Amino acid sequence: MSAILRFAPPLAKRLHVGTARIALVNWLFARKRGGRLILRLDDTDTSRDAEAGAETVRQDLRWLGLDWDDSFRQSERLDRYAAAADRLRAAGLLYPCFESEAELQAKRDQRVRRGRSPVYDRAMLKLTAEQRARAEAGGKRPYWRFRLSNATREWQDLVLGPCHVKLPTLSDPVLVRANGTPLHALTSVVDDLAEGVTHVVRGEEHVMPTGVQMELMAALGGDPTRLRFAHLPALTVTGGRKPARGLDELSLRSLRQDGIEPEAVAAYLARIGTKGEAVPASLAELTAAFGFAGLSPKASGFDVAALLRLNRAVLASLPFAAVADRLPPGATEAFWTAVRGRLDLLAEARGYWEIVAGTIIPPVIEGESGFLRTALDLLPPEPWTDTVWTDWTAALASATGRAGPALTDPLRLALTGEDDGPEMSGLLPLIGRARTARRLEVAGS
């Protein structure tokens, strides 16, 4: 049987790395199994700009390199959800409630003070038809709760292993708001049944709702034992800089704006929770290597410093054609070859382009005026080849007796204004003789 998965991102905020990881794992599993991935847009909450949120999600997923085989909006399926709710009412499993949030909170507080679980007390099950009529005559409209059984729902999780949820420990979930709008607990089950979803991959925070989902699926005529679940442990931010508001603020959009490559993000997210450090890999390579058995059931750290290291490795592997349109105007393939191994972020290439093609002013290097004058005198005539740095420094070493850093460090500082950077053998031909001569004069003045 072909695998069918669905990804249902939140539309009210940007896609953060934890959610992106869930999307990626869904995608990798679907592609490895030759299955289908459905993008579900949960837009029944009309209080938010669902279209803008949906477009942001689509852009973020495409930037990461992910696609999907089908997509639908829950707002287009309201009739299905209403029919499912009617079916549950007819079976006596959906009951009306009128308590306000303040009343419910007071009940919860009272139960806690008595040392009892704050689970809902099902008081509305005792509501008579006359009491309901009086409430509605007074302007109230009921919201609807699903009555859970006393069963324990069990499953073998693909990541966490054996899991179970004791339904009596949970409050009966609200499935329909007072205004008739269906809630996620109902809509997701109806959609999974309609689409024939076989695997649900999501965050570990959904373990308890999984028990409810299995119960509701059975009530609607489905077989929850045919559905496989994989709950990914939470991510925590570790290493390097930390976002002020935690992981939720570390979005794909912010990483993109910071200059992180999508290949680096995908390779890093795919390796989180597995053994070994992430290395540059294409989506095809990540798909071939993917398996739930390799994912740790424990919480994993999202190490920003490790992501930057991987981004450097990804940039070093990219051909000129992959970055040409994002480099400074005029940048050549020779320039990219010279600098790509030294970049944590692509934006850093602008600084190196200023070195080879701009008008930087190097610092005056104290005590090196004589050495730099000799360097200027021995500067070879153009045209320069890729051996000019080796030839020039060999002649300079012979003339001055210098070697190693004493020879090369003053030259690098004079020509680039930096103490470190790409190999000078690649930069010098790009800087050219005229710029080199001017900078040697300034640094040695």
Image (tube, grey):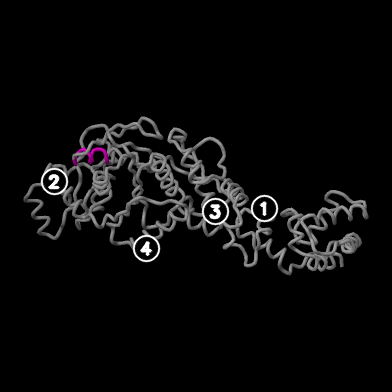
Range of the magenta residues?
213-220
Q: Which residue is mark 3?
A: 261
Q: Which mark is residue 89?
A: 2
Q: Which mark is residue 421?
A: none
Residue located at (44% from left, 32% from top):
293
Q: Residues within 10 Å of mark 4 (few under 14, many from 20)?
A: few
Q: Nearer the viewer, mark 1 or mark 4?
A: 1
Q: Which mark is residue 52?
A: 4
For mark 4, give the secondary structure. helix
Q: Mark 2 is on which residue type?
A: Arg
- Distance (Cα) linking label 1 and label 4: 38 Å
- Distance (Cα) linking label 3 and label 4: 24 Å
- Distance (Cα) linking label 3 and label 2: 51 Å
Q: Residue 260, position in %: x, y?
A: 55, 54
* Quarter of the image that includes the N terminus: top left
Residue located at (84% from left, 62% from top):
365
Label 2 or label 4, whichever comes before in sequence order: 4
Residue lying at the far top in this picture: please name it. 162
Determine whether label 3 and label 4 are within 8 Å by CB: no
